[in-house]
Amino acid sequence: MGIVYQTDKRSGITYAYENQSFWDKELKRSRSKRTLIGRVDKETGEIVPTDGRCRKRSPNYKPTDHEQPLPKTMKGLKEEVLKLREENAALKEQLRALR
């Protein structure tokens, strides 16, 4: 077993995988299975656990002391999405009134 680091070319994010090699009897060659551990923090080099499905946290998540808040840009985007949803609902209401 070992840890393999792989960088996503599209996003520039480096992910850490646990690599386990085994012998495939049918193909008669060595094969390996990788399991995602998490993202590698660019600043500290630490591995931040993730489930790999772009989800924030699992239901069993317990916060640690070194948790980082969402970047300000993400908060701004969230607020903008909420405003757009409200505007969309108001426009749908106007459309119903016009019909």
Image (cartoon, helix red, strand yellow):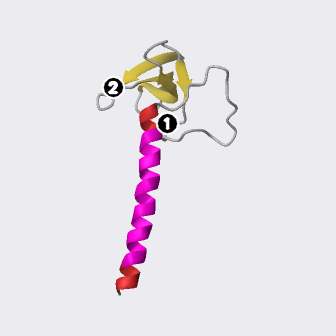
Taking depth in this image into account, of 98 and 54 the one nearest to the observer is 98
Please identify, in this view, whether the residue under mark 2 or under mark 1 is nearer the observer.
2
Residue extending furthest left? 9
Residue drawn at point x = 60 percent, y = 38 percent: 57
Prevailing SS of the magenta stretch: helix
Amino acid carrying mark 2 in the image: Gly
Number of marks in the image?
Answer: 2
Taking depth in this image into account, of 83 and 50 the one nearest to the observer is 83
Residue drawn at point x = 67 percent, y = 29 percent: 63
Image location (x, y in percent) of residue 85:
44, 60
Residue 15 sits in which quadrant?
top left
Residue 60: say if magenta.
no
Image location (x, y in percent) of residue 44:
49, 12
Amino acid carrying mark 1 in the image: Gly
Residue extending furthest top? 44
Quadrant of image for the N terminus = top right
The residue beneath circle 1 is: 52
> What residue range appears in magenta?
75-94
Image location (x, y in percent) of residue 11:
33, 31
Residue 12 sits in which quadrant?
top left
The residue beneath circle 2 is: 12
Is residue 59 at all visible to an observer of this figure?
yes
